[in-house]
Image (tube, grey):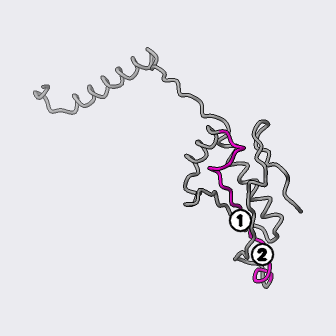
Amino acid sequence: MSLPSHLNVTQKLRVPTDEFTLTYARSGGPGGQNVNKVETKAVLRWPIADSPSLPEDVKDRFLRQYGTRINNDGELVMACDEHRDQPSNRTAVLERLTGMLANVARPPKKRRPTKPTKGSQRRRIAAKKQRGQQKKLRRPPGRDA
């Protein structure tokens, strides 16, 4: 099974898969003797800083959110060894990358500051007065000040 020509993230965002380097390694965990002789772990490397297919704003958001996954050479390194066969791990690592890119593809919504309503302001002040009155009633007589 070969790689698709493009990784479709959104309708407008497509990343050519020739930008990625997929290597395979022996993975640990259960699998009997198979684990010692078959390279099923998929390792994806992508020099994201040099990628011409990502718009700059998407690239900035990706680097801000997933910067800890980028090594000193500026490559995103992802590995998957969940499955016991190579094609499943390759598909899983590409799906993870698609999810990460889809997460940063939409710009975040701008926050619009809101004012508290008049009713909520009145309720807050009334509650404060009630708490103050409660505390005042706990004091011994003659110590109102």
Q: CA distance from mark 1 to mark 2?
A: 11 Å
Q: Is 35 contained in the magenta span?
A: yes
Whether 25 is drawn above or below 130: the answer is below
According to the picture, the residue beneath numbered tag 1 turns out to be: 43
Whether 103 is drawn above or below 125: the answer is below
Does 47 sit left or right of 37 as displayed?
left
Whether 108 is drawn above or below 133: the answer is below
Nearer to the camera, 140 or 69: 69
Q: Quadrant of residue 57?
A: top right
The three-letter amino acid code for the residue at tag 2 is Glu
Q: Position of residue 65 (x, y in %)?
A: 57, 47
Which residue extends farthest bottom?
Answer: 33
Nearer to the camera, 72 or 68: 72
Q: Dot 2 lies on which element? A: loop
Which residue extends farthest left?
Answer: 142
According to the picture, the residue beneath numbered tag 2 turns out to be: 39
Q: Position of residue 66 (x, y in %)?
A: 59, 51
Nearer to the camera, 127 or 134: 127
Q: Quadrant of residue 2?
A: bottom right
Does 45 sit left or right of 37 as displayed?
left
The three-letter amino acid code for the residue at tag 1 is Val
Q: Position of residue 145 (x, y in %)?
A: 12, 25
Q: Residue 7: which numbered mark, if any?
A: none
Neighbour tally class for label 1: few under 14, some 14-19, many 20 plus, Cα within 10 Å: some
Residue stretch in magenta: 34-55
* Quadrant location, the N terminus: bottom right
Nearer to the camera, 3 or 50: 50
Identify the residue at horizontal 14%, vertical 25% (top origin): 144
Identify the residue at horizontal 75%, vertical 40% (top origin): 13
